[in-house]
Image (spheres, grey):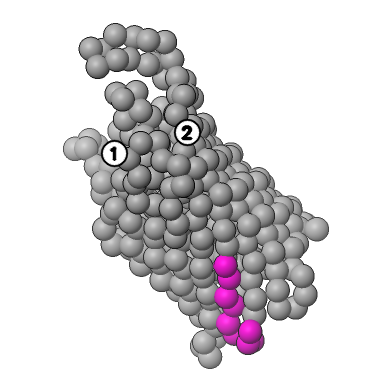
Amino acid sequence: MTAIVLALTLIAIDPGAGTTGFDFLHITPTAREAALAGATTAKPDGAFGFYYNPAATGALTGAQFTYINYPAGIHLGSAAYTQPLDNTKGVGVGIFYLNAGTMKKTNEQGEELGTFGASFTSLNLSGSYQPTGGLLIGIGIAGLYGTIDTFFSVGLVGNLGATYEPPVTGLRLGFSARNLGVQIKPFGTRDPMPLEFSLGACYEPTPGLNLNLNLSKPQGNRFNIRAGIEGWVNQFLALRAGYNSLGSDLMAGSGADPLAGFAAGIGIRYNRYQLDYTFVPMVVLGAAHRISFGFTL
């Protein structure tokens, strides 16, 4: 039991994580969205944009791949593909994977019993529909599988979302309800799923400059505010920064505390290809690095 608690603690070190089953779903997989501190409900981008709001499914025909290096030897990866079906509908599929590495296995007396591993996977399918010119709605479903040592868990969640462009130039509003579901087979006690409701806005005062704001309420955690800014310096280079108010949970009285909750990154675009990098300081825990590569077809 001590080993299982340790593994779950390692997985829950992200500022967005709380105390629910399949907590890793609160982690932001892609680099661009992480640089904006997750303030992307109104305007996610890339092939895996439907992970944050299924209304973004099929916005482009393309693929995206991400690798995340976390503290404590935790590694994550994601891959996604989306495609419009016609002018009003689109579909997408994606996978998000977490490997917590190898850890020591002990009994209640602290005696070592070898090692164990932990991993979690989310397989996502999403679709969107545009009933009117300014409104997009989307729905998604994800199958979940997790292992800790010899134990395993299975879950199923649904995602709902919408975006709306009001008659205000450059403004887009968004709503999402993510991870509505249940643990079909829990590790032990059946925990609540990491349900999260988000309202967001994205304002583009000039072409290439995006101002993003989110208000979110995750299951097992408090309301939080997320803000991000993205500016394309030219057609090739973007600079990004963001802040998540849940970052205060990482403060530990160290000199690095002022960095808690902040993130920064860059994007490089050439022709049909885009490379994004994000650095997320996690104070005394270390730092997380994300690299995403995407392309359109």
Main SS category, magenta section = strand
- Left/right placement of residue 1 relative to residue 34 reads left
Q: Position of residue 234 (x, y in %)?
A: 64, 62
Given residues 296 and 169, the one toward you in this image is 296
Given residues 65 and 153, the one toward you in this image is 153
Q: Which residue is mark 1?
A: 256
Q: Which mark is residue 152?
A: 2
Let me know if residue 134 is in the magenta part: yes
Let me know if residue 109 is in the magenta part: no
Query: What is the magenta range?
Result: 131-139
What residue type is disc 1 on?
Answer: Ala
Q: Secondary structure at mark 1?
A: loop
| Direction left: furthest residue | 253
Given residues 243 and 255, the one toward you in this image is 243
Q: Is residue 147 above or below residue 137?
A: above
Q: Quadrant of the N terminus?
A: top left
